[in-house]
Image (tube, rainbow, N blue to C red):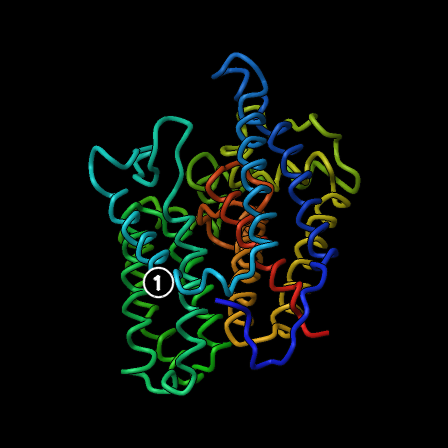
Amino acid sequence: MKRPRSEGLIRRGKPDYILFFAILTLLGIGIIMVFSASMVRSLKFYGHPYYFLMMQTIWAGLGLSVMFFLMNFDCWRYRPFVPYIYALSMLLLVVVLIPGIGQVRNEARRWLGVGSLSFQPAELAKATTVLFLADSLSKRREKLKNLVSGLGPYLVLLGITFLLVLMEPDLGTAVAIAGCAVVVIFVAGARMFHLGLLAALSVPVLYWAIMGEDYRRRRFFAFLDPWKDPSGSGWQIIQALYALGTGGPFGTGIGYSRQKWFYLPEPYTDFIFAVLGEEMGFLGTSLVLLLFFTIAWRGYRTAMAAPDRFSCLLATGMTTLIVLQAVVNIGVVTGSLPITGIPLPFISYGGSALLTNLMASGILLNISRYAVR
């Protein structure tokens, strides 16, 4: 499928280089921080300090290849295949739950593959859900005003996706998918009353999701008062705050974090921002926040200047996918939000998440080439 002709002659220009360099800068910071935050555990469990660095570099290389390909491959050309791509991602969410097929780590069944060569279907579902909604909603603008026949089918599909991811269990990713979907549906023209009703109906579901599992309940109340159980459920938040406080304005220097020496759990994944703050200080964390703000600014700017409805919704969703995860992760590390298990885009260790975020970046950069300026 070619790009839309209804907008007139749309010339393909250069990608948004400000957005491009913001993404590459975050990726570079991420590789450095993964090495620094993981070297202690890598040395203990793998006999050398470079294991996580090598794995992250491999995934970064693969992700950059995908990003450059999608940046130069017009999103309208794969639009006819979007329903099949979405169906495949849903199938993988089912397959990963089958005993003997999905890998179990830390009592969670989230991975497909063998050993280190594995990926999380839930991460792929983030991008494919946005892709599907952008494609479908761009064709149903008026029908979306009707709650039952318009919005209803999407709510059913999103509910199935939410439950499949929650069964892994992975509440953080499920909430991220739901959050991105709501933003795309809102921009597509859904009525505020319907979205408000949806929000009200989701409250008991979230209550059940949080209170139904003991570890989620402990995490939630630890966010409210981590010092109530400083050696248990509040340990992660307290150690993260220690790390951020120790960093001061300029940090202790790259490689000189103390909290990564088995004080801070998950120092190179979900809580890598705490190590970054300890080693790079307020200036380093401010730089990262500025880069994510830049992605939000240029991403939503691209959406507003997109040449058609499909690319507008797609750019909105992909920008929200990156920015929402960053906001939630940083909120968790700073003790502002409950622990959810969402990684920091481009910076946290994790091949599936990195690949998905770079894929989203490639799509966003491609749309920026056709932005009406």
Relative to 367, does residue 278 appear above or below in the rendering? Answer: above
The correct choice, above or below, for 306 with respect to 343 in the image is below
- Residue at 42% x, 36% y: name it: 232
Q: Amino acid at mark 1?
A: Pro
Asked if residue 116 is positioned above or below residue 11 in the image, the reply reads above
The crowding category of the residue bearing disc 1, from other C-alpha atoms within 10 Å (few below 14, some 14 to 19, many at least 20), is some
Q: Position of residue 191 (x, y in %)?
A: 43, 85
Q: Horizontally, is 164 left or right of 320 in the view?
A: left
Helix or strand or loop: what does disc 1 sit on? helix
Q: Is residue 35 left or right of residue 190?
A: right
Q: Which residue is mark 1?
A: 83
Residue 149 at x, y = what percent? 28, 82
Locate residue 350, reporting x and y percent: 49, 37
Q: Which quadrant holds the C terminus?
A: bottom right
Which is more toward the observer, 217 or 74? Answer: 74
- Outermost residue, left direction? 99
Q: Residue at x 75, y 30 (%)?
A: 253
| Side of 144 relative to 292 (left or right) | left
